[in-house]
Image: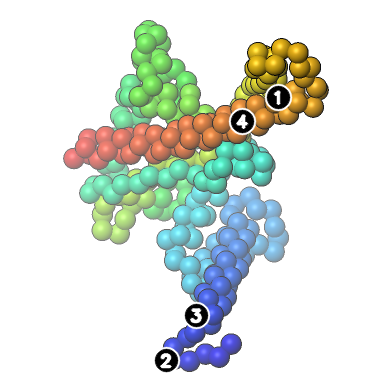
Amino acid sequence: MKYSHDALSESDATELWERAARLQQDAQKQADEQVRNALPGAGNPDAVSYDVALQAAVESGIDEVHVRQAALEMRLAPQLDRQPVAPWHVKALGFAEKTVSERVRVPAPASSVRPVIGQVVASPAFESEPIDIVEFDERTTALVYEVPKVPSAMKASFMQAFDTESFHYRVRSVAEIKRYAIIVSEQTDGSTEVAVHTSLDRSVRVNAIALRIIQAVAVPLAAATGALGAGILVSSFAPGLVIGPVLVGLAGAAAAIGAGYGIAVLYRRAYNKAFKRVRESFRKMLTSLRMQTG
């Protein structure tokens, strides 16, 4: 490839972008591996320190903010809904997101923000059970919570327990998210960044399996119905015609394919909608926090 400071041909520009993308991807993988080895409990005698891994990532062109976030998420992973996700789970749902993160900046020190977080999480709207506290560094702490399917404030009311607009219904009952973390990071200007973060491992796995179960039940039923319908339809127009097994099989197969595809499309749309509602629910929690912090 000929390189000129003045101009690049279209093919040269394409090659330049592809090479740059590959270099960035390689640098990201190397930095992630170094950060992972540097985390506590890595158990690798040759592991580099976190500071060294951070420096290597920055020198590779990765912003320090993203490296810190990646390290924190890896540190939190064992505390959240960590479950094995197979490629077919992702393919079944047509969904590749791995986490949900929403954040807000609060004009108050962390010492003033933490008590308000406790009030918000204890309120009926967002009631969750405290699980653990993860100290990341001198400026950042993560509070891990578990979402009950039916919080104590709603147990007295059957209708409230199944309120489709509630935080608990959207996050736990629909999306199948059990745990989330509230990350509190004190900033140099005295403000505090608060983020709600969760893993989608369990959510994707459970919903993909549910989709396959629904298809396993519905597809044979659709095939049988389709084959029966074909027989009735042909017999009504040609009473003397004997329908062969091939025609019946084709009719059943067509019905089964249509049912399987239709179910998958509907389920994927529903899951994407559930994902968006989880984000909305976390944003509402952060809005409540910001308003109460004043």
- Mark with earlier residue (1, 2): 2
Q: Nearer the viewer, mark 3 or mark 2?
A: 3
Residue type of the residue flagged with mark 4: Gly
- Mark with earlier residue (4, 1): 1
Of residue 178 and residue 90, the one placed in the foreground of this image is: 90
Q: Nearer the viewer, mark 3 or mark 1?
A: 1
Q: Could you tell me if the residues under marks 3 and 2 are in contact, i.e. CB atoms within 8 Å?
A: no
| Relative vertical location of residue 214 with respect to residue 4 in this rendering, above or below | above
| Relative vertical location of residue 20 with respect to residue 202 in this rendering, above or below | below
Q: Could you tell me if the residues under marks 3 and 1 are in contact, i.e. CB atoms within 8 Å?
A: no
Residue type of the residue flagged with mark 1: Gly
- Mark with earlier residue (3, 4): 3
Give the spatial CA distance, label 2 vs label 4.
Answer: 55 Å
Task: Residue 20: give its label.
Answer: none
Residue annotated with mark 4? 258
Q: Residue at coordinates 33% horizontally, 49% vertically from top-left?
A: 193
Q: Residue at coordinates 41% horizontally, 50% vertically from top-left?
A: 140
| Relative vertical location of residue 47 with respect to residue 87 in this rendering, above or below | below
Residue annotated with mark 2? 6
Q: Residue at coordinates 54% horizontally, 35% vertically from top-left?
A: 265
Residue 212 seen in render: no
Instruction: Locate residue 71, reporting x and y percent.
Output: 52, 55
Q: Quadrant of the N terminus?
A: bottom right
Instruction: Locate residue 267, reporting x and y percent.
Output: 53, 31
Residue annotated with mark 3? 10
Give the spatial CA distance, label 4 vs label 1.
Answer: 10 Å
- Mark with earlier residue (2, 4): 2
Give the spatial CA distance, label 1 vs label 2.
Answer: 63 Å
Residue type of the residue flagged with mark 2: Asp
Q: Nearer the viewer, mark 3 or mark 4?
A: 4
